[in-house]
Amino acid sequence: MQYSIEVNNQVEIFDLNKVAKQASGAVLLRVKNTVVLATVAREDTQVEEDFLPLTVQYIEKAYAAGKIPGGYVKRETKPGDFETLTARIIDRSLRPLFPKGYAYPTQIVVMVLSADPEVDLQVVSLNAASVALYLSDIPVNRPVCGVRVGYIDEKFVINPSNSELKQSAIDLYVAGTKGELLMIEMRSLPQQTTQLIPMVAIEPMIDPSLSDSMAQKQLMNEFSEDMMVEAIDFAGKAILRASSAYEEAFKEHKKEDAALELKPEIENENIAIYIDKFYKAEVKNAINQMAKSERASELSKIAKQISSDEVAQKEGWDEAVITNVLGKYKKKIVREQIINEGVRADGRGLEEVRPISIETNVLPNAHGSCLFTRGQTQALVVTTLGTDSDAQMYDILTEKVPFVEKFMFNYNFPGFSVGEASPLKAPGRRELGHGNLAKRALAPSIDLASPYTIRVVSEILESNGSSSMASVCGGSLALRAAGVNTLKLVAGVAMGLIFEGDKHAVLTDIMGLEDHDGDMDFKVAGTSDGITALQMDIKLGGISLEVLKEALYQAKRGREHILSLMTEADKNIEINEDVLPKLELFSVDPSKIVDIIGQAGKTIKEIIEKFEVSIDLDREKGEVKIAGGAKKNVDAAKDYIISITSKDNGRSFGKKPFKHDKERSKPNFNIGDEFFGTVKSVVDFGVFIELKDGIDGLLHISKIKAPLNVGDQVKVCVSEQKGNKISLSLVE
């Protein structure tokens, strides 16, 4: 059975009961030439643990784009970062739909079978997974819709194509149901603009009659809080249209809810009543122990004490059940204390940010580092600079050529940061998600034309909430500490929300306890001028735009406070020039690139080996990029290349040499010829001296007795000639 639904700037064709009929729910969704299969399967036996056992997998098939997977094993194996992050988006969007107490292992699999270069795979995949879940026998009675919003030519655009999104100032992804937002991800997209700049602004002493100059300027495209609310409202209306269309089309095809047993929220109400009557003060005291490990230890002691009480012995209360009920009761106390008293577990007010300390360049041999500590959350963030050869290259299903990423952000979360003795392992979904959020926040502040490949690594050394935002703050300063001239400092703050009846409280800089027991996790990063990245997960439905606006403006005040501390720390940064890689970027005549390379690459190999540098050449633009560990070596290599390209004896591709070019192609000197020459340049290994007819010779440093400067006249003789290379000696 096939349904065609035209909504939100795209036509979605759903095939029901066509494939994967043994799954609990399955749907085949086509948008243009993109085809996605989404399936839902569940087990019939509950897990004992008190959590939702949901697994989401998003898989891209290489054949979907007419490709064969790279690598030694020519098949899809470990999911890439984009696949993992997309699976995470689907999970965060659908998880809130499951009823409380649902404990049946459930798997949602989304497979991309055909990929259109212009179709947004994340939007299509979520919509397919949502309909598959809605059609299944799992008691989920609302379809979810995902939309992407762009801002092009100062207008909001719903579900822009992939090529249109590249012209957008914002990338906003929102998922929700009718009237309820469930998940938000946003990033600002930097853009290069060309501006007319008066010459007097560049050089005040210049003749004002000269023509003005064109200059490139990068826009970070931060979004104000009001614009953000407007964009989310725009997305919410689109979600309402689509989710209503899904429900209308598929309601009659939804399977009857299976007869599933749901676990009660409170396993034993009598235990909860007993705790409230006799142990309320002890629980409040445990909550107000700041560290997670301390709090867990204290609650464990309380559970043991209750289990040894006469009532517990008489009623046969199991310690595991007591612990479970105690955890639920703890959540209630946390929320009541905030709503009724306006006091948080650590004694802070609702808008108060934890104490912050900042140290920069704490690692002497790293290019740039920052130790950012906020309360009991601590991030050691390190920046490393590299060349084009260090860039990350990976395939994108909707792109024909591999994408080259010159800015990378890696986030690591070891167990010891929360007092756990867990083994170190490869980054999981959470680590990739937090790293991606920090990357999205910082990317607009980095010059798009930066010659460096930049890697930032955040090592979480201690965690009690909002480690991703600590990574943003530390990352922004670590970039500055490495000498990267970012456009603006970027800070991040995690917000929380608690609803109790008709009351609510917005919390600034939430800790782990408030994240776990709250109704919203809302991370906002940006500059003093606006938001660069945003991530929101809502655990309850129906947050109003007024409350959202309140949270955004409260986040702005928190962000400004943190930025003021970061600005002071930025002033005190001492860049360690000795460990920074040195990089020179300059242009030569494109026709001279062949002279730098030399016959069979001989010349460039000699330069690389002699000066211990790496060289990247752009033949079209005539750009030369030299990188090395020592400035003197880079400078010497640059001077050497300039000496090669400044001669008129170079050859050019596609250019027939004139007769006089051939005559000058080889310098006509004899060994012992003497000249009064002018010093053209001074390099680490000697000086270049102009002889005649624009020909330069090298006077090696071993033959120089007294320092020579550019412009000095000196008598030399030709001591050796190899091809175009002239070696000189001093004449006494």
Image (cartoon, helix red, strand yellow):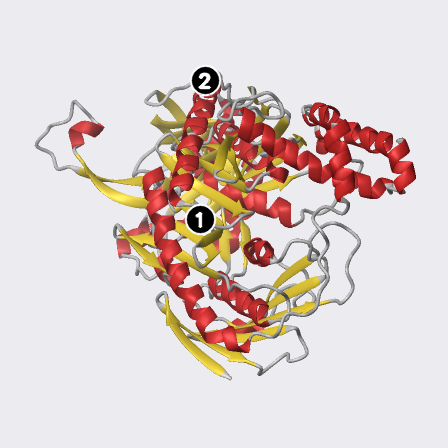
* Left or right: where 698 falls relative to 308: left
Residue 85 image point, x, y percent: 57, 54
Q: Is residue 485 visible?
A: no
Residue placed most toward the observer, 723 or 207 = 207
User: Is 732 rendered above or below residue 115?
Assistant: above
User: Is 701 rendered above or below residue 448?
Assistant: above
Callout 1: 10 Å neighbours few (<14), some, many (20+)? some
Residue under label 1, please give it: 617
Most extreme residue toward the left, as rendered?
209
Residue at 76% across / 33% down in the picture? 275
Residue placed most toward the observer, 94 or 80 = 94
Residue 511 image point, x, y percent: 60, 31
Residue under label 2, please give it: 568
Give yes or no for contact between labels 2 and 1 (Cβ–Cβ under 8 Å). no
Residue 23, by quadrant, is bottom right
Residue 455, by quadrant, is top right
